Image (cartoon, grey):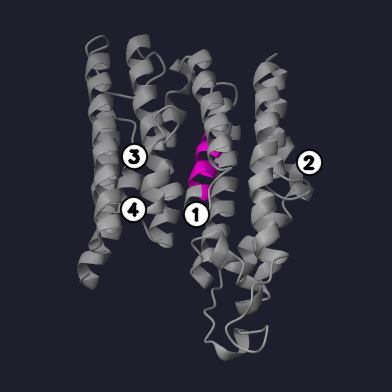
Amino acid sequence: MNPLAQLIIYFTMFMGTIITLLSSHWFLAWMGLEMNMLAFTSILIKKTNSRSTEAATKYFLVQSTASMILMMAIMYNSLFPEQWTMMNNINQSSSLVMMMALAMKLGMAPIHFWVPEVTQGTPLIPGLLLLTWQKLAPISIMYQIHSSINTNILLILSSLSIMVGSWGGLNQAQLRKILAYSSITHMGWMMTTLTYNPDITIFYLLTYIVLVTTAFLALNLNSNTTTLTLSHTWNKHTWLMPLMSSTHLSMGGLPPLTGFLPKWITIQEVTKNSNFIMPTIMVTMTLLNLYFYLRLVYTTSMTLLPASNNTKMKWQFENTKTTLLIPPLFILTTFLLPMAPTILTIP
Protein backbone atom coordinates (compact mmCIF):
# COMPACT_ATOMS: atom_id res chain seq x y z
CA MET A 1 0.00 0.00 0.00
CA ASN A 2 1.17 3.50 -0.82
CA PRO A 3 2.68 5.11 2.32
CA LEU A 4 0.67 8.32 1.79
CA ALA A 5 -2.58 6.36 1.43
CA GLN A 6 -1.70 4.36 4.53
CA LEU A 7 -1.07 7.58 6.47
CA ILE A 8 -4.43 9.01 5.37
CA ILE A 9 -6.25 5.81 6.37
CA TYR A 10 -4.72 5.69 9.85
CA PHE A 11 -5.31 9.43 10.32
CA THR A 12 -8.97 8.99 9.32
CA MET A 13 -9.37 6.11 11.76
CA PHE A 14 -7.78 8.16 14.54
CA MET A 15 -9.86 11.27 13.80
CA GLY A 16 -13.09 9.25 13.57
CA THR A 17 -12.58 7.96 17.10
CA ILE A 18 -11.59 11.40 18.42
CA ILE A 19 -14.69 13.02 16.86
CA THR A 20 -16.93 10.47 18.57
CA LEU A 21 -15.13 10.84 21.90
CA LEU A 22 -15.44 14.64 21.91
CA SER A 23 -18.90 14.94 20.38
CA SER A 24 -22.10 15.80 22.22
CA HIS A 25 -24.17 15.76 19.02
CA TRP A 26 -25.65 12.52 17.74
CA PHE A 27 -24.88 13.12 14.08
CA LEU A 28 -21.23 13.98 14.73
CA ALA A 29 -20.85 10.90 16.95
CA TRP A 30 -22.39 8.72 14.25
CA MET A 31 -20.17 10.31 11.59
CA GLY A 32 -17.08 9.54 13.68
CA LEU A 33 -18.14 5.90 13.94
CA GLU A 34 -18.52 5.73 10.15
CA MET A 35 -15.13 7.32 9.49
CA ASN A 36 -13.55 4.88 11.90
CA MET A 37 -15.32 1.88 10.36
CA LEU A 38 -14.46 2.72 6.73
CA ALA A 39 -10.81 3.43 7.54
CA PHE A 40 -10.39 0.22 9.53
CA THR A 41 -12.02 -1.81 6.73
CA SER A 42 -9.28 -0.49 4.43
CA ILE A 43 -6.66 -1.63 6.95
CA LEU A 44 -8.17 -5.13 7.02
CA ILE A 45 -7.84 -5.53 3.23
CA LYS A 46 -4.25 -4.30 3.20
CA LYS A 47 -3.13 -7.89 2.60
CA THR A 48 -4.79 -9.09 -0.57
CA ASN A 49 -5.63 -12.68 0.31
CA SER A 50 -8.93 -14.47 0.61
CA ARG A 51 -8.87 -14.64 4.42
CA SER A 52 -8.30 -10.90 4.87
CA THR A 53 -10.94 -10.09 2.26
CA GLU A 54 -13.45 -12.34 4.01
CA ALA A 55 -12.65 -10.79 7.40
CA ALA A 56 -13.01 -7.26 5.99
CA THR A 57 -16.34 -8.15 4.35
CA LYS A 58 -17.74 -9.62 7.58
CA TYR A 59 -16.55 -6.63 9.58
CA PHE A 60 -18.04 -4.15 7.11
CA LEU A 61 -21.42 -5.90 6.94
CA VAL A 62 -21.79 -6.16 10.72
CA GLN A 63 -20.61 -2.63 11.45
CA SER A 64 -22.68 -1.02 8.69
CA THR A 65 -25.78 -2.89 9.88
CA ALA A 66 -25.15 -1.70 13.45
CA SER A 67 -24.64 1.86 12.18
CA MET A 68 -27.96 1.80 10.32
CA ILE A 69 -29.76 0.51 13.41
CA LEU A 70 -28.09 3.19 15.53
CA MET A 71 -29.08 5.95 13.11
CA MET A 72 -32.66 4.67 13.07
CA ALA A 73 -32.76 4.87 16.88
CA ILE A 74 -31.20 8.36 16.85
CA MET A 75 -33.77 9.64 14.35
CA TYR A 76 -36.64 8.08 16.30
CA ASN A 77 -35.36 9.67 19.51
CA SER A 78 -35.04 13.09 17.84
CA LEU A 79 -38.78 13.14 17.09
CA PHE A 80 -39.74 13.64 20.74
CA PRO A 81 -37.49 16.40 22.15
CA GLU A 82 -36.79 17.60 18.56
CA GLN A 83 -33.06 17.92 19.10
CA TRP A 84 -29.94 15.88 18.27
CA THR A 85 -27.95 16.67 21.40
CA MET A 86 -26.84 13.75 23.55
CA MET A 87 -28.69 13.92 26.83
CA ASN A 88 -29.82 11.76 29.72
CA ASN A 89 -33.57 11.71 29.08
CA ILE A 90 -33.50 9.44 26.02
CA ASN A 91 -36.68 7.68 24.98
CA GLN A 92 -36.70 4.14 26.41
CA SER A 93 -37.42 2.47 23.07
CA SER A 94 -34.61 4.42 21.40
CA SER A 95 -32.27 3.64 24.28
CA LEU A 96 -32.90 -0.09 23.92
CA VAL A 97 -32.22 -0.06 20.16
CA MET A 98 -29.12 2.11 20.65
CA MET A 99 -27.79 -0.32 23.25
CA MET A 100 -28.29 -3.31 20.93
CA ALA A 101 -26.58 -1.50 18.03
CA LEU A 102 -23.60 -0.51 20.17
CA ALA A 103 -23.43 -4.03 21.64
CA MET A 104 -23.21 -5.33 18.07
CA LYS A 105 -20.35 -2.93 17.36
CA LEU A 106 -18.56 -4.04 20.54
CA GLY A 107 -19.04 -7.73 19.75
CA MET A 108 -21.10 -8.58 22.82
CA ALA A 109 -23.19 -11.75 22.97
CA PRO A 110 -25.54 -12.76 21.43
CA ILE A 111 -24.25 -10.71 18.45
CA HIS A 112 -20.65 -11.81 18.89
CA PHE A 113 -20.14 -14.35 16.11
CA TRP A 114 -18.17 -12.00 13.88
CA VAL A 115 -15.45 -11.19 16.44
CA PRO A 116 -13.49 -14.51 16.44
CA GLU A 117 -13.78 -14.88 12.66
CA VAL A 118 -12.64 -11.35 11.85
CA THR A 119 -9.80 -11.48 14.41
CA GLN A 120 -8.62 -14.82 13.02
CA GLY A 121 -8.59 -13.46 9.46
CA THR A 122 -6.41 -10.44 10.24
CA PRO A 123 -2.68 -10.07 11.01
CA LEU A 124 -1.69 -9.51 14.62
CA ILE A 125 -1.39 -5.71 14.62
CA PRO A 126 -4.77 -5.06 12.90
CA GLY A 127 -6.18 -7.66 15.29
CA LEU A 128 -4.81 -5.60 18.17
CA LEU A 129 -6.52 -2.48 16.79
CA LEU A 130 -9.78 -4.40 16.38
CA LEU A 131 -9.82 -5.52 20.02
CA THR A 132 -8.62 -2.23 21.54
CA TRP A 133 -8.90 0.99 19.52
CA GLN A 134 -12.16 0.01 17.84
CA LYS A 135 -13.83 -0.34 21.25
CA LEU A 136 -13.24 3.27 22.30
CA ALA A 137 -15.89 5.05 20.23
CA PRO A 138 -18.87 2.74 21.00
CA ILE A 139 -18.00 2.63 24.71
CA SER A 140 -17.76 6.43 24.82
CA ILE A 141 -21.33 6.68 23.47
CA MET A 142 -22.58 4.12 26.00
CA TYR A 143 -20.80 6.08 28.72
CA GLN A 144 -22.68 9.26 27.76
CA ILE A 145 -26.11 7.59 27.70
CA HIS A 146 -25.55 5.21 30.63
CA SER A 147 -28.26 6.76 32.80
CA SER A 148 -30.90 5.96 30.15
CA ILE A 149 -29.85 2.33 29.63
CA ASN A 150 -32.03 -0.43 31.06
CA THR A 151 -29.87 -2.05 33.75
CA ASN A 152 -31.53 -5.48 33.64
CA ILE A 153 -31.16 -5.88 29.88
CA LEU A 154 -27.55 -4.70 30.03
CA LEU A 155 -26.80 -7.24 32.78
CA ILE A 156 -28.35 -10.00 30.64
CA LEU A 157 -26.11 -9.04 27.70
CA SER A 158 -23.10 -8.85 30.03
CA SER A 159 -23.73 -12.27 31.58
CA LEU A 160 -24.23 -13.82 28.13
CA SER A 161 -20.96 -12.26 26.94
CA ILE A 162 -19.06 -13.54 29.98
CA MET A 163 -20.41 -17.07 29.56
CA VAL A 164 -20.00 -17.24 25.77
CA GLY A 165 -16.46 -15.83 25.90
CA SER A 166 -15.41 -18.21 28.67
CA TRP A 167 -16.88 -21.33 27.07
CA GLY A 168 -15.82 -20.37 23.54
CA GLY A 169 -12.13 -20.05 24.34
CA LEU A 170 -11.79 -23.51 25.89
CA ASN A 171 -11.33 -25.61 22.75
CA GLN A 172 -9.37 -23.12 20.64
CA ALA A 173 -5.86 -23.71 19.30
CA GLN A 174 -5.59 -20.38 17.45
CA LEU A 175 -4.21 -17.62 19.66
CA ARG A 176 -6.14 -14.86 17.89
CA LYS A 177 -9.43 -16.68 18.48
CA ILE A 178 -8.54 -17.18 22.14
CA LEU A 179 -7.89 -13.45 22.51
CA ALA A 180 -11.11 -12.67 20.62
CA TYR A 181 -13.21 -14.81 22.98
CA SER A 182 -11.34 -13.25 25.89
CA SER A 183 -12.31 -9.83 24.50
CA ILE A 184 -15.99 -10.87 24.49
CA THR A 185 -15.64 -11.87 28.14
CA HIS A 186 -13.96 -8.60 29.10
CA MET A 187 -16.68 -6.61 27.30
CA GLY A 188 -19.20 -8.35 29.54
CA TRP A 189 -17.21 -7.41 32.64
CA MET A 190 -16.94 -3.77 31.52
CA MET A 191 -20.62 -3.34 30.78
CA THR A 192 -21.67 -4.88 34.11
CA THR A 193 -20.85 -1.71 36.06
CA LEU A 194 -21.82 0.81 33.36
CA THR A 195 -25.13 1.78 34.95
CA TYR A 196 -23.81 1.43 38.52
CA ASN A 197 -20.52 3.29 38.25
CA PRO A 198 -19.37 4.13 34.69
CA ASP A 199 -15.96 5.29 35.92
CA ILE A 200 -15.15 1.67 36.81
CA THR A 201 -16.00 0.73 33.21
CA ILE A 202 -13.46 3.25 31.93
CA PHE A 203 -10.82 2.00 34.38
CA TYR A 204 -11.48 -1.59 33.30
CA LEU A 205 -11.21 -0.53 29.63
CA LEU A 206 -7.83 1.13 30.16
CA THR A 207 -6.49 -1.89 32.05
CA TYR A 208 -7.83 -4.22 29.35
CA ILE A 209 -6.11 -2.19 26.60
CA VAL A 210 -2.77 -2.42 28.41
CA LEU A 211 -3.10 -6.20 28.89
CA VAL A 212 -4.18 -6.94 25.32
CA THR A 213 -1.53 -4.64 23.82
CA THR A 214 1.20 -6.43 25.79
CA ALA A 215 -0.11 -9.84 24.70
CA PHE A 216 -0.32 -8.92 21.00
CA LEU A 217 3.10 -7.22 20.89
CA ALA A 218 4.69 -10.25 22.54
CA LEU A 219 3.01 -12.58 20.03
CA ASN A 220 4.01 -10.32 17.13
CA LEU A 221 7.64 -10.45 18.22
CA ASN A 222 7.71 -14.17 17.42
CA SER A 223 4.89 -14.13 14.84
CA ASN A 224 3.01 -16.61 17.02
CA THR A 225 -0.52 -17.43 15.86
CA THR A 226 -1.12 -20.94 17.26
CA THR A 227 -0.39 -22.77 20.49
CA LEU A 228 2.10 -24.91 18.56
CA THR A 229 4.24 -21.92 17.53
CA LEU A 230 3.89 -20.58 21.07
CA SER A 231 5.81 -23.60 22.31
CA HIS A 232 8.89 -22.39 20.38
CA THR A 233 9.21 -19.28 22.55
CA TRP A 234 11.79 -20.93 24.79
CA ASN A 235 13.96 -21.72 21.76
CA LYS A 236 13.78 -18.30 20.14
CA HIS A 237 13.32 -15.66 22.85
CA THR A 238 14.07 -17.00 26.31
CA TRP A 239 13.53 -13.60 27.94
CA LEU A 240 10.03 -13.45 26.44
CA MET A 241 8.85 -16.62 28.20
CA PRO A 242 8.22 -15.18 31.71
CA LEU A 243 6.75 -12.01 30.19
CA MET A 244 4.18 -13.89 28.11
CA SER A 245 3.34 -16.23 30.98
CA SER A 246 2.75 -13.33 33.38
CA THR A 247 0.67 -11.46 30.81
CA HIS A 248 -1.56 -14.48 30.16
CA LEU A 249 -2.08 -15.07 33.88
CA SER A 250 -2.88 -11.38 34.36
CA MET A 251 -5.46 -11.51 31.55
CA GLY A 252 -7.00 -14.50 33.32
CA GLY A 253 -7.39 -12.40 36.47
CA LEU A 254 -5.00 -14.31 38.72
CA PRO A 255 -3.97 -12.40 41.86
CA PRO A 256 -1.67 -10.64 42.63
CA LEU A 257 -1.30 -9.52 39.00
CA THR A 258 -2.84 -6.40 37.45
CA GLY A 259 -5.73 -8.23 35.75
CA PHE A 260 -7.17 -9.13 39.14
CA LEU A 261 -7.64 -5.47 40.15
CA PRO A 262 -10.45 -4.43 37.74
CA LYS A 263 -12.27 -7.72 38.34
CA TRP A 264 -12.06 -7.20 42.09
CA ILE A 265 -13.38 -3.62 41.86
CA THR A 266 -16.16 -4.70 39.47
CA ILE A 267 -17.39 -7.50 41.75
CA GLN A 268 -17.21 -5.17 44.75
CA GLU A 269 -19.35 -2.54 42.98
CA VAL A 270 -21.96 -5.04 41.75
CA THR A 271 -22.23 -6.58 45.23
CA LYS A 272 -22.75 -3.12 46.76
CA ASN A 273 -25.90 -2.82 44.65
CA SER A 274 -27.38 -5.99 46.21
CA ASN A 275 -26.82 -8.07 43.09
CA PHE A 276 -25.41 -11.47 44.09
CA ILE A 277 -26.36 -13.62 41.09
CA MET A 278 -24.19 -11.67 38.65
CA PRO A 279 -20.98 -11.88 40.75
CA THR A 280 -21.50 -15.64 41.11
CA ILE A 281 -21.68 -16.04 37.33
CA MET A 282 -18.67 -13.78 36.84
CA VAL A 283 -16.44 -15.60 39.33
CA THR A 284 -17.43 -19.04 38.02
CA MET A 285 -16.73 -18.10 34.41
CA THR A 286 -13.41 -16.52 35.42
CA LEU A 287 -12.22 -20.00 36.40
CA LEU A 288 -12.83 -21.15 32.82
CA ASN A 289 -10.91 -18.15 31.51
CA LEU A 290 -8.07 -18.90 33.86
CA TYR A 291 -8.02 -22.51 32.67
CA PHE A 292 -7.32 -21.76 29.01
CA TYR A 293 -4.78 -19.11 29.97
CA LEU A 294 -3.04 -21.64 32.21
CA ARG A 295 -2.96 -23.93 29.20
CA LEU A 296 -1.14 -21.21 27.24
CA VAL A 297 1.29 -20.71 30.12
CA TYR A 298 1.98 -24.44 30.19
CA THR A 299 2.62 -24.46 26.43
CA THR A 300 4.89 -21.42 26.65
CA SER A 301 7.03 -22.26 29.67
CA MET A 302 6.81 -26.00 30.29
CA THR A 303 6.83 -27.49 26.79
CA LEU A 304 10.04 -27.80 24.78
CA LEU A 305 9.62 -29.18 21.28
CA PRO A 306 12.58 -30.58 19.30
CA ALA A 307 14.60 -27.76 17.75
CA SER A 308 15.51 -27.71 14.05
CA ASN A 309 19.22 -27.47 14.84
CA ASN A 310 21.49 -29.25 17.31
CA THR A 311 21.14 -26.70 20.09
CA LYS A 312 18.15 -25.86 22.23
CA MET A 313 18.85 -22.14 22.00
CA LYS A 314 18.17 -20.58 18.60
CA TRP A 315 18.05 -16.96 19.60
CA GLN A 316 21.78 -16.36 19.06
CA PHE A 317 21.46 -17.25 15.38
CA GLU A 318 18.57 -14.93 14.57
CA ASN A 319 18.10 -11.20 14.18
CA THR A 320 15.73 -10.59 17.05
CA LYS A 321 13.21 -7.76 16.80
CA THR A 322 13.06 -5.44 19.76
CA THR A 323 10.37 -3.06 20.92
CA LEU A 324 10.62 -0.39 23.57
CA LEU A 325 6.95 -0.73 24.49
CA ILE A 326 7.09 -4.25 25.91
CA PRO A 327 9.13 -3.60 29.14
CA PRO A 328 6.94 -0.74 30.49
CA LEU A 329 3.75 -2.55 29.44
CA PHE A 330 4.99 -5.68 31.20
CA ILE A 331 5.42 -3.68 34.41
CA LEU A 332 1.86 -2.39 34.11
CA THR A 333 0.45 -5.88 33.48
CA THR A 334 2.04 -7.35 36.58
CA PHE A 335 2.62 -4.73 39.29
CA LEU A 336 -0.47 -2.50 39.32
CA LEU A 337 -2.27 -4.32 42.14
CA PRO A 338 -0.25 -2.65 44.97
CA MET A 339 -1.74 0.65 43.79
CA ALA A 340 -5.26 -0.62 44.56
CA PRO A 341 -5.70 1.46 47.77
CA THR A 342 -4.79 4.63 45.86
CA ILE A 343 -7.07 3.79 42.92
CA LEU A 344 -10.00 2.94 45.20
CA THR A 345 -9.76 6.32 46.94
CA ILE A 346 -10.05 8.24 43.66
CA PRO A 347 -13.59 9.73 43.50
Helix or strand or loop: what does disc 2 sit on?
A: helix
Mark 4 falls on what kind of element? helix
Whether residue 346 is visible to the viewer of this picture, yes or no, is no
- The disc labelled 1 sits on which kind of residue? Gln
Vertical relation: 142 (above or below) 181? above
Secondary structure state at the residue bearing disc 3:
helix
Residue 327 rendering spot, x and y as whole percentages: 64, 68
**Is there CB contact under 8 Å for labels 3 and 2?**
no
- Type of the residue with mark 4: Phe
Position in image of residue 198 (x %, y %): 55, 29
How many residues crowd around disc 4 within 10 Å: few (fewer than 14), some, or many (20 or more)? some
Residue 264 in which image quadrant:
top right
* Residue on which disc 2 sits: 341
Quarter residue 297 falls in: bottom right
Query: At which x and y percent is residue 230?
Result: 58, 65
The amino acid type, in three-letter code, at marker 3 is Thr
Quarter holding the N terminus is bottom left
Q: In the image, what residue occupies the spot 28% across and 26% down? A: 70
Is residue 173 at least partly visible in the picture?
A: yes
As helix, strand or loop, the secondary structure at mark 1 comes to: loop
Q: Earlier in the sequence, mark 4 or mark 2?
A: 4
Residue at the disc numbered 4:
14
Residue 163 within the magenta-colored segment of the rendering? no
Q: Answer few, some or many: residues within 10 Å of disc 3's Cα (few below 14, many 20 plus, some between 14 and 19).
A: many
- The residue identified by callout 3 is 20
N-terminal of the two: label 1 or label 3?
A: 3
Compare residues 44 and 326 and report the one nearer the observer: 44
Vertical position of residue 90 compared to residue 50: above or below: above
Which label sits on residue 256?
none
The boundaries of the magenta stretch are: 178-187
